[in-house]
Image: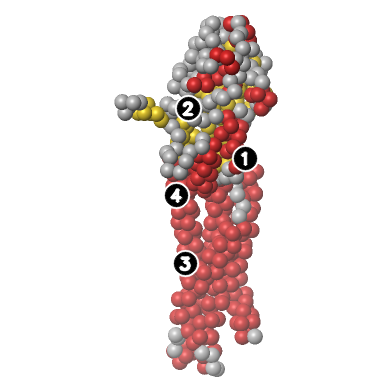
Amino acid sequence: MRLLRTVNTALKALRRNPMRAMLTTLGIVIGIGAVIAMMEIGAGSSAQLRQSIASMGANVLLIMPGSTTSSSGVSQGSGSTITLTPQDCEALVAECPSLRAVAPTVRVRTQIVYGNRNWVPNQMVGSTAAFLVVRDWAVAEGEAFSDRDVLSASRVCLLGQTIATELFGETSALDKEIRVNNVPLRVVGVLARKGANMMGMDQDDFLLAPWTVVKYRIAGGALASSNQSASGSGSSGNTLSNLYPSDPPTLYAEQSSAQSQNHPMLVRFTSIDTIMAAARSSEQIPTAISEIRTVLRRQHHLRTGQENDFEIRDMAEMTNTLSSTTKLMTNLLLSVALISLVVGGVGIMNIMLVSVTERTREIGLRMAVGARGRDILRQFLTEAVMLTVVGGVAGIGLALLVGGALILSSVAVAFSLPAALGAFACALVTGVIFGFMPARKAARLDPVTALTSE
């Protein structure tokens, strides 16, 4: 009952000068509205930034073969041994829940020819359709090849925007036939533009084809016993060289050079250059690395204490960039929020001090009839909190209107209920902090002095 009487008295006091109360609340409205709107914009921008950095590979893990050491003790470097197989990819997909997608990769560097034009791509990768999921890469025109195309080694490919422009100009690249090491590839899709990566390399200078095509048709070497990336582009696809391992020769049927070019026999125990895996989020990268290590050690029959014959590399630089950028944006928003609330709180304090001065005789009269200092303190503190509460509710409404207008303007905005509740709680705290000094001043007035004031 005492609280209800205090609130009722505060409402009557605020209604005496509604214009002043409204203008005082307006500062809180603008402050809270600006805080919530900026938090919504910041959350939307952070989400957009995370998506952008993730598209560059922030959540991507690169699994490479291990290194070998010669008898003289000279290390051949990472990738110099052959340990990764397509079966490793299948095991990772089935047994690593923290991975979003896994793709085998085979790389080669050679020339592309179309008509009287030619081009050497910055990257020519053989993989599966999961590669686009790992890299978060969309197909702008046409469609991606399927897993059936990978199994059957279909002669299809996807082109980046740079290659499509260099070879075809303004005309569409779909269903056109290009030649790579005299192997015809039909263009089934053109990838969406990605631009340069963090190191300035053109990501659109890119060709993607089924890895079976790149490994057996384009590179065309004895690739079951050599690393594709280390072996160079390989020119045996143009020559009459044998496409099959010669050891042991009894395992494979003899073919003519024409048959070997047109119908290559896939090697049963084959290898791949690397494996690219995408974690479901940046936070799950350590878990993903642990799962990958466990699965691959079992796949490669490595005993306890035996060193790994593979390496796992994460994009730590991109992840650190994401974390530092998000932290910087959060700190900036908190600073702006504090400034806005301080400005609104100073307005509340100023008006409440004026109110105490105007109502000095009223305060003295209430003390004379039995009101104690804490009653006066509670009274003025309630008035200050009510101003900030009304301002907080109106500020939330203003923020929703601003957010809706920004969405119509194609600005990234993410509505958040915790942000609104947090801003409202800040409004309450602001009212208590900045209303306490005027309330304390009113509570400490001398009743005799207050009654005799003009």
The outermost residue toward the left is 72
Task: List the residue tagged with mark 4.
Answer: 328
Which class describes the residues within 10 Å of circle 2: few (<14), some (14-19), or many (20+)? many
Quarter of the rendering containing residue 14: bottom right
Please tell me whether mark 4 or mark 3 is closer to you in this view: 4
Q: Position of residue 225 (x, y in %)?
A: 49, 21
Find out whether the residues at labels 1 and 3 contact each other: C-beta distance under 8 Å: no
Q: CA distance from mark 2 to mark 3?
A: 70 Å
Q: CA distance from mark 4 to mark 3?
A: 27 Å
Q: Residue at x 58, y 43 (%)?
A: 96
User: Which comes sooner in the sequence, label 2 or label 3?
Assistant: 2
Residue 210 in view, yes or no: yes
Find out whether the residues at labels 2 and 4 contact each other: C-beta distance under 8 Å: no
Residue 82 tag number: 2
Please tell me whether mark 2 or mark 1 is closer to you in this view: 2
Task: List the residue tagged with mark 1.
Answer: 94
User: Which comes sooner in the sequence, label 4 or label 3?
Assistant: 4
Q: CA distance from mark 1 to mark 4?
A: 38 Å
Q: Amino acid at mark 4?
A: Leu
